[in-house]
Amino acid sequence: MKTTPVPVVFLLVLAFVPVPCDSSQPPVLDLEALPETRSLFAPLDDVHLLSSGLLQLGQSMREFVQKTKGQINTIFQKLNIFDRSFVRLTALAGEIKESEEELKQTAAVLNTHNEEIKELSEKISVKVESILQEKGQLLNKVEIMEEKLSSLSVDLVTVRQAAEINSLREVIQRQEQSINNLLAAMVEQGRHLDHQTMKIKLLEEKLAASASAQETFEKMAENSMSELPTAAPFLTSDTSSNATMILFAADFPSDCSELFDRGERANGTYAIKPNGSEPFMVFCDMSRGRGATVIQQRRDGSMNFDQPWEKYENGFGELQGEFWLGLKKMYSLASQGNSVLHIQLEDWKQNRHFIEYRFYLEGPVSNYTIRLVYLSGSLPNPLSNHTGVVFSTKDRDNGRHWASRCSHPQSGGWWFSSCGDTNLNERYSRVRANGRSERRRGIQWRSGRKTSHSFAFTQISIHPMDSVNSL
């Protein structure tokens, strides 16, 4: 603020002028009588110069303070970014360590099974060798008997000798049948052993990838501690998941039906490789006279199916229990063409029903649009209006049929066509003692506006059209 010092100086000068006591006579200033005194005030120009200098100094100080505040705010922002990045990094490193421990435990279990299979194969091999030795001995006996018989005439052959020869032949035939059965068992055990070896190799690759990812994150953490980041990236768990599956040369089947054609008859987890995709583990149901690749299974409500879009796209759960295989893997299976969708449901009275559709599934660009054509089944067909319906979840309502428009909020991901429609990924609800509890809010299979059914067990699987059997 600028100030004008002239009036102040003038007032100070007037203050030093003497005032006479008699107001009737004008004052007379005697210049000769005044002693020469030096002024106590600076000249006006010096005052102006000093005030302008102080004003410039104040403006410079204000600009310096504002600039310093801006720099301090920038430093605090960088510190906040670093703190968030470091917390994410620490959490991700912990998840990787937990996954590594689980993989180590699984690898140990598989190694144990592998050792048991090896021991069983060795026992079978020893038994086969002993049988082959017995067979050789029997053949030698038969040759000796034939030589004896050839030396004798046909008339001299007794009934007892003929019976002995026939019994030896029967023993040899039984031994050959036993050898063939054992050889078939050895082939089957060898196939299981190869499958277990493949699982172990996959787990070893996962462990190596997890260790590599953990080392990378630890290096990033060390680098982050040494300097402040200007723009820290947001890390996600996709960095480790992309490196968990490393391929090696193997003859992977395209689906569970191909495993069934190769002779597999046991339900369980297997590695498959559909056309144009990477290998992944699935649960195969071999119990209906064909191999079906299971894409969804619910049995006890142990898994929460109210998951976001990312989980439904990549899959979640345990293949031996409750799980959703994932839209990406389902699309790779359906892309092979000629697919049938088999839905099997069990009510609370342990009555089982099924329904089958000709099945088409589009890719992620169209939000996994489904197309169904009814084939057969013992259930009503509530999915007749599900042709061209997109997949939706609570955080990605592609079909605009979510909770904001419905009286009862939806749960889980599904191909929703209307509010309260059929939803096999709905919240799992158990029946109370009175039998009338939350079944209407559980896993729904609606056949009409007022008719709905709730189920305790669901299984959705895919198999080729050629392998359809009449049930």
Image (tube, helix red, strand yellow):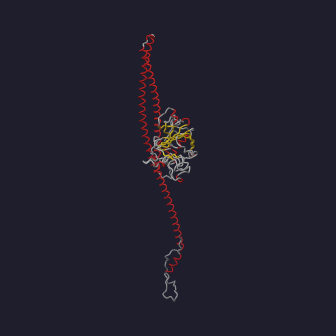
Nearest the camera: 64 or 308? 308
Q: Is residue 362 visible?
A: no
User: In the displayed structure, would residue 112 be above or below residue 61?
Assistant: above
The x and y percentages for residue 64 are: 51, 62
User: In the displayed structure, would residue 394 be above or below residue 329?
Assistant: below
Nearest the camera: 417 or 256? 417
The x and y percentages for residue 434 are: 43, 48
The x and y percentages for residue 172 are: 44, 21
Find residue 468 and report its image quarter. top right
* Residue at (52, 87) in percent of width and height: 26
* Residue at (56, 35) in percent of width and height: 466
User: In the displayed structure, would residue 328 be above or below residue 40?
Assistant: above
The x and y percentages for residue 294 are: 50, 40
Nearest the camera: 239 or 68? 239
Task: Identify the residue at the far bottom of this view.
Answer: 24
Nearest the camera: 155 or 253? 155
Q: Is residue 426 visible?
A: yes
Find residue 360 and report its image quarter. top right
| Left or right relative to 262: residue 128 | left
Looking at the rendered structure, the number of numbered marks drawn on it comes to 0
Find residue 105 and report its image quarter. top left
